[in-house]
Amino acid sequence: MVKALLFGLLGITFLVAVPYPWIGVLASYLMALLTPQHVWHWHFEGLRAVAMILAPTFLGFGIKVLAGRIDYTPWFNKRVLLMLILWIAFIQSYYLGPYVNIINDFRFTDSAWAFSIINKILLMWFIANLLLDTEGKLRALAWMVAGCSIYLIYWANVQYLTGNWLNMPGAQWGRLSGPTDPAGKGPYLDENNFALFFVITIPILWHLSLTLKDWWWRAAIWLIIPLGWHAIFLAGSRGGLLGLGIVTLVIGFRSKYRKLGLMLLPALAAAYMLQAGDTMKSRATTIDDFRTERSAATRIEAWTAAMAMMRQYPLTGVGIASFGPAFPTYSDYEPREAHNTFFQISAEIGVAGGLAYLALNAFNILTMRRNAKRLKPREDRRGRFLFEMNEAALASSIGFFVCSMFLSLQLIELFYFLCLFVNITNLLSHHYLAALENQGAKAEMSGAAPAQADGAPATGAPAAPPDAPERDRNGRLVRPERDRNGRLVRPRPAGST
């Protein structure tokens, strides 16, 4: 019965995604972030769910291209150019990398599989930038991610409360990994990746809650966030814990509601003391002890090997997903992943790819920070939503970059989702601000008060009734004139004597 219902939902998505390919884009990111094929793998057996979503999405996009109904403006910016450079670096490393076809005991990932995955991720990324072009679609994307976050927070805590986590791969180290299929595969098999998911999505949950009018809906989301912290503690990820701390600081000090935002800091500290288990606390105490703590010391060894690979193959790298096979050539230590995304990407696909990755992270953070100054907290619904999404993207981007310094995240879709989220938010913010400037210019020419982009006056209030206080052309109240006794002085009607 459930499988039939699932097949029906996929069939509906298949039919809807042709005329509305942006819905297919949302469905594909739902599959990538929530990974329902791993959460409920028994229902997905025999179903090629991803293919059933991608095929009609690409078909619908192609129809729009042929019909001339695609605006290519979102592609004309530095972020898209950097992503293209990164994609080219992946391609040339697969065909020219010297270790791509080397098979030994240290090949952690198949190069052909990794190349296929990155091509699908980047193709969808470029298409999504063109199809998610309105505030409504951005809102749908944000709430889809929030739904994924809420469910996986629930899933993680249920695994802990029921004891199911003891049967999972990370249990032998006292850590909770994410959902996997019967073969033990999944993007959140690595506990660090699972923790990273919550580091990125918790800011989106928080800032979405601030766009809601009803306090009880806000409170419901706020009550979920500490359970998200607990999920990170269960994963036992030091990088995730550090990223969570940085994200919480960013939210607290940048929040429009400063007192409310700063309350998150002691709340997180209290949650850590009460909820974090022995594994998380023991690992947290060794974050800065890289000389004596073995896990941290091995990172230094891997980074040294990565720099040797970069020096020898600065253009092609050793090959996509070939860091492990190349490791014994450049180090006498036990082969492992780089545990630093910049070093991993630079060593595997070349220095140009690594620099493009670094620049993308920098542009994400700097763009959202600069954009926040232009948007500022606004009272109209459209401006308020864009401002909160801008703040969410900024906090998540900072959190990702912090985690990427200690984790290898070159193939995880969360990074590419973040770049998409930033690009769309930035583009729609430019449209919103341009609309405000145009309306302000028209109002100045006509002598009327400028309006917000959604038609409301500049203050966010409804249109002024005839007896409303007088305002100047910038929308500010004009202080009425009073006599020496404090009584209002009313101007005489024109023509009176």
Image (cartoon, rainbow, N blue to C red):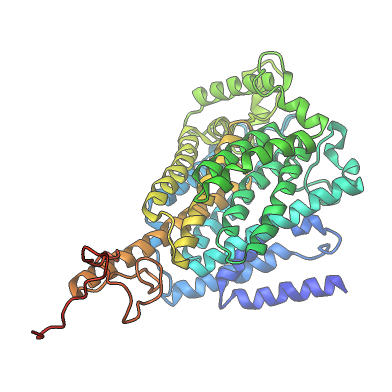
**Residue at the limit of the structure toward the front, as seen here:** 485
Residue 242 versus residue 51 in the image, above or below: above
Residue 16 versus residue 459 in the image, above or below: below
Q: Residue at x 33, y 66 (%)?
A: 436
Report the quarter where the N terminus lies. bottom right
**Where does the image place residue 486, in percent across and percent down from the top left?**
27, 65
**Where does the image place residue 388, in percent across and percent down from the top left?**
51, 56
Mark yes or no: residue 117 visible: yes
**Where does the image place residue 342, in percent across and percent down from the top left?**
54, 33
Residue 60 versus residue 310 in the image, above or below: below
Report the quarter where the C terminus lies. bottom left
In the picture, residue 231 is in which quadrant?
A: top right
Mark yes or no: residue 31 visible: no
The residue closer to the viewer here, 56 or 167, is 167
Q: Residue at x 50, y 40 (%)?
A: 357
Q: Residue at x 23, y 72 (%)?
A: 442
Q: Residue at x 23, y 66 (%)?
A: 482
The residue closer to the viewer here, 14 or 311, is 14
**Where does the image place residue 320, in percent across and percent down from the top left?**
60, 38
The residue closer to the viewer here, 206 or 289, is 206
